[in-house]
Amino acid sequence: MKISTPVAALAVLVLASVHLGLAFLPGTPFSPPMNAVLFAANLYTLYCAANVLPGRSGLQVVGFVGGYLALFALTVVLLDKKPLFVLLLVAYASVYGSKALLGLFGLFVLCFVVLQPYAFETFIPLAFVWVVTWRARGEASRFTLICLAAGLLSLATVLFPLIHLSLQDSAMTLWRTFQREEVRDALAVSLGSALLASVIVALYGVPLAYALARLDFPGRRVVESLIDLPILVPQSVAGVAFVVLLGPGSPLGRSLESSTGFHVSGSFVGLVIAQVFVASPFLVKTALTGFEAVPVQLELAARNLGATPWRAFFHVALPLARRSLLVGLALAFARAVSEFGCVILFASSPVSAPILVHTEFLRAGAADSRPIATLLLVTCLWAFLMLQLGATMMPFALRRPK
């Protein structure tokens, strides 16, 4: 049953009058200034309801009144925060006409009123889940939306510690932390070595991925499985393996030291080697998926038109797979810059950012290591987002054949 304009206005007017009358009764817990504020808030609520409720069903009118009473019970009866009730009432009346905004308002009340002191770190992921699910509702069934919402909520739960960490320190605290020389040096070492490791992985990983995508030979599946080996092997095991192979006590390590005077273990080169090992699967597998999505017929057509295999690769396959390549580069960079287990055993010097966080935590505890960890998190996220943005917006710097 649809509610007409006079009925809706009358229902809300009665509700406002009842609360206004209760506020002015003798012995009321509301002070006179608060009575005036409540009266103004009720008048505004009446105005919003008169514009929103006409033509709505009776259930929606009941929902509006129920939301009003729920806010009153939560903020006034349970929490005894009358000014908060006024603020939330004005916001509630303003957004009731929009289901999307009403959902965000409900999450805001849940997080900032109920889930203290974790308000911001709960509201951000929950609002993201709500917005994404709401925008996808027109193209998906209810079951698919439930799966999407459940998956996003699970992802938000997994990422909650990082969200909580990122909100613990102010921008001024992070800036003071960044001004420390050892922090800047560690970040520079991590970013520089990770960038170099990503380039090295790309130099051999992209050709390898292209060959695996275009060739079908005995043992191809074995090669693909071996590519995943750095993911499967514990990084501490990889660190010990590198020490045994290239450490000062190994034959190869002694040979390099006697001939060149250079120690691979505990050097920048050792750090890059460890990062190349852990990052390689992420670029190779992503590039393989990208090349497999490029139709072979396009390269054959280019060959028939006179292009050499090199030109067909650089001007057809590589540009068409550029999104996957850039995503793989971003993943490889992120994995390299965050490596700790292999690095601390094989190349703990120069000090990278993850090593500095670990050292600071052992020296002074979580309170002093937290700003460094947050700064590393923000830096890594910024670099990762820039690389991901480049996967969709940056043009590929290759010329088309003339």
Image (cartoon, rainbow, N blue to C red):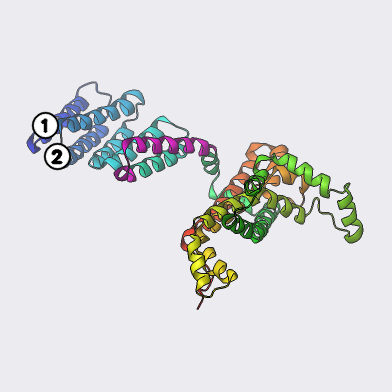
Q: Which residues are magenta?
A: 135-161
Q: Give how far apart the Cα atoms at labels 1 and 2 are.
A: 17 Å
Left or right: 54, with 234 as reference point:
left
Question: Which residue position is annotated with label 1?
Answer: 1
What residue is drawn where x is 52% and y is 55%?
A: 292
Element type at mark 1: loop
Q: Amino acid at mark 1?
A: Met
- Is 150 or 63 nearer to us in this picture? 150
Query: Quick check: 62 above or below 309?
Result: above
Would you say the magenta stretch is mainly helix, strand or loop?
helix
Q: Is residue 311 magenta?
A: no
- Is 343 or 93 nearer to us in this picture? 343
Percent coordinates x, y for residue 152 in the rendering: 44, 39
Percent coordinates x, y for residue 313 in the rendering: 56, 66
Question: Which class describes the residues within 10 Å of circle 1: few (<14), some (14-19), or many (20+)?
Answer: few
- Is 81 or 317 nearer to us in this picture? 317
Percent coordinates x, y for residue 17 in the rendering: 15, 30
Quick check: can you spot residue 16? yes
Query: Quick check: 45 above or below 250?
Result: above
Q: Amino acid at mark 2?
A: Ala
Counting residues from the start of the chain, the first of labels 1 and 2 encountered is 1
Please say if the residues under marks 1 and 2 sit with CB atoms less than 8 Å apart.
no
Q: Is residue 158 magenta?
A: yes
**Quadrant in the rendering for residue 267:** bottom right
Percent coordinates x, y for residue 233 in the rendering: 69, 40
List the single residue furthest toward the right.
258
Question: Which residue position is annotated with label 2?
Answer: 50
Element type at mark 2: helix
Residue 313 got which mark? none
